[in-house]
Image (spheres, grey):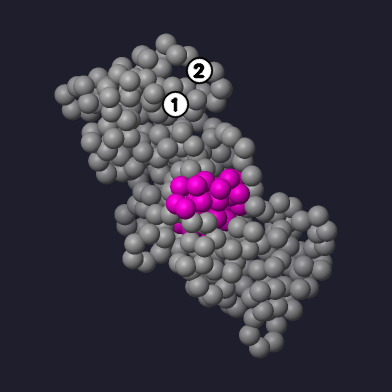
Amino acid sequence: MGNCQPTIVPYEDFDVMKDIKAIRKACKGFGTDEQAIIDILANRGAFQRQEIKQAYCDKYDDLVDVLKSELTGNFEKAIIAMLDTPLVYAVKELRKAMKGAGTDEDVLVEILCTATNEDIAMFKECYFQVHERDLEADIEGDTSGDVRKLLTALMQGERDESYEVDEELAEQDATALFEAGEGGFGTDESTFSHILASRNYLQLQATFKAYEQLSGTEILDAIQNETSGTLKKCYVALVRVAKNPQLYFARRLNKAMKGAGTDEDTLIRIIVCRAEFDLETIKDLYLEKYDVSLKDALRDECGGDFKRLLLAICH
């Protein structure tokens, strides 16, 4: 959707041997030259970073192990994240969100509700390769009720991805949503789930407009009033993504920095994963919405090498 501008593009004068020697030098001797590591990894595309990881492994040691022993904290987490492709990193995050006691629903919502059909297909395949587990089965085992139904529907990867808008269908869907929610007794979640999981984004935008004309309520307000918990989070995410995926990520970044304490995991996930796709666009929308640049927000919230790395990825 829209014009998606990345902040990280493949480095033109890429020389993998030169890079691995420089990284090795940065890790040798007393103390680590973190800036040298940042300068290289934040300026190489994901597949170039894969080549660096492989070449380092062939010539010296396992690069991940080396960096884990040299680095600490959020800086270490972010650097290690950059040594996976965005796809592999995403499926590791999905697994982490479901492992152990309790589920980190916010991560599931963020990754699955923003995914394209192609993303979903790749997640399933990659999840199996990395974890030797079935992603759909894990999601089903880890969620329940309407949330499970909705995520299972999304996992079919059957959203219409055309740019066609059928005004008549928009009216019908808006009416169905109204009758299932505000206009009815109790909310009929299956109607919401079906429409939000299957229609294309432009079609949904038309439906949201029709909904507002019909009910006098913005669809997000209706969702806030009619639903709760994780289901509400899913619906809000799907509506926001249908309206503007990059603005959805800008909001997530802002939320991760608001209030007491910073949610560094979310910062790492979005900044590292979106750098190759649309982070430049997310930065523009962040500035537009919050009157402060993403870089300035990160400068205020983060410190040390972690801050330097995130700013370098943001360019």
Is residue 2 among the parts visible in the rendering? yes
Pointer 1 local density, CA inside 10 Å: few below 14, some 14–19, many at least 20: some
- In the image, 77 versus 149, the foreground residue is 77
| Residue 216 figure quarter | top left
- Residue nearest the observer in this picture, 69 or 175: 175
Q: Which residue is mark 2?
A: 165
Instruction: Name which residue type carries label 1.
Output: Gln
Q: Is residue 94 visible?
A: no
- Quadrant of the image containing the N terminus: top right
On the image, the x and y values in percent for residue 239 come to 40, 34
Disc 1 to disc 2, how far (Cα)?
9 Å
The amino acid on which the numbered mark 2 sits, given as a three-letter code, is: Val
Q: Is residue 4 above or below residue 176?
A: below
Q: Earlier in the sequence, mark 1 or mark 2?
A: 2
Residue drawn where x is 34% and y is 62% of the image? 259
Dot 1: element:
helix
Other-residue count near label 2 (Cα within 10 Å), few / some / many at <14 / 14–19 / ≥20:
some
Give the residue at x 81% y 68%.
18
Q: Badge 1 is on which residue?
A: 205
Q: Tell me the magenta residue range.
A: 266-291
- Residue 23 screen position, x and y as percent: 72, 73
The majority secondary structure of the magenta stretch comes to helix
Please provide percent x and percent y for residue 218.
32, 30
Quarter residue 228 falls in: top left
Taking the magenta stretch, the answer to whether it contains residue 180 is no
Judged from this view, the residue extending furthest toward the front is: 291
Do callouts 1 and 2 mark residues in contact (Cβ within 8 Å)? no
